[in-house]
Amino acid sequence: MAYVPPDTKTAFNLRKEVKLLVVDDQREHFAQLKAAAEVYNTDFLIECKFAASSDEALKLANEWQPSVVLVDLHVIASTLGLLTQIAEIGPAVIASSESRISDMPEKVARYGAVGYVTKDDSAEDVESVLSYIASLSGPLPVAH
């Protein structure tokens, strides 16, 4: 019996697939997350899209059906309302900000967010955020 290596495409598909929509007014933050998603993970594949406004975010959330949406709280004045609108569409919503206000996780939860993360440039924190995002996208497929 000859050894047949696993089909690369099939093996690749055993990883959890995450569709991440990043809503942020700073494209640099999106680029950092996207680059980290491509480099740091082995257990999940994150496909990323970017929106710079609430209108663009709602359009992508409806059309593309992301599994997780990461919303910067400083994108627009009515960001808390945007959290609610996106949460009603169905994806898990995570709020993000540079602010370290202690009651922020409770505040954003009232608007439909399942989590709150502070923006940080350290590689460990970015990888931690990506792992958290992946955990919200359901279980890994079972390999047979």
Image (spheres, rainbow, N blue to C red):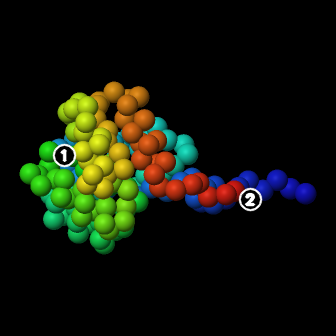
The earlier-in-sequence mark between 2 and 1 is 1
Q: Residue at x 26, y 31 (%)?
A: 102
Circle 2 sits on which residue? 144
Query: Could you say which quadrant of the image residue 97 lies in?
Result: top left
- Element under disc 2: loop
Q: Which amino acid type corresponds to the residue marked 1 in the rendered image?
A: Leu
Answer above or below: position of 140 versus 74.
Answer: below
Q: Disc 2 versus disc 1: distance between alpha carbons?
A: 42 Å
Viewer-proximal residue, 138 or 143?
A: 138
Q: Residue at x 25, y 39 (%)?
A: 104
Q: Is 61 on the left or on the right of 18, as rendered?
A: left
| Residue furthest to the right | 1
Residue 99 percent coordinates (x, y): 20, 33
Specify whether residue 7 is in view. Answer: yes
Mark number displayed over residue 24: none
**According to the image, label 1 marks what residue?**
73
Amino acid at the residue labelled 2: His
Q: Name which quarter of the figure residue 7 lies in.
A: bottom right
Q: Which of these two is toward me, 30 or 137?
A: 137
Whole-percent x, y for residue 143 in the image:
69, 56
Q: Is residue 14 left or right of residue 90?
A: right
Task: Determine whether the residue tagged by mark 1 lies in a helix, strand or loop.
Answer: loop
Residue visible at 31% across and 66% down in the picture: 88
Q: Residues within 10 Å of mark 1 (few under 14, many from 20)?
A: many
Q: Quadrant of the C terminus?
A: bottom right
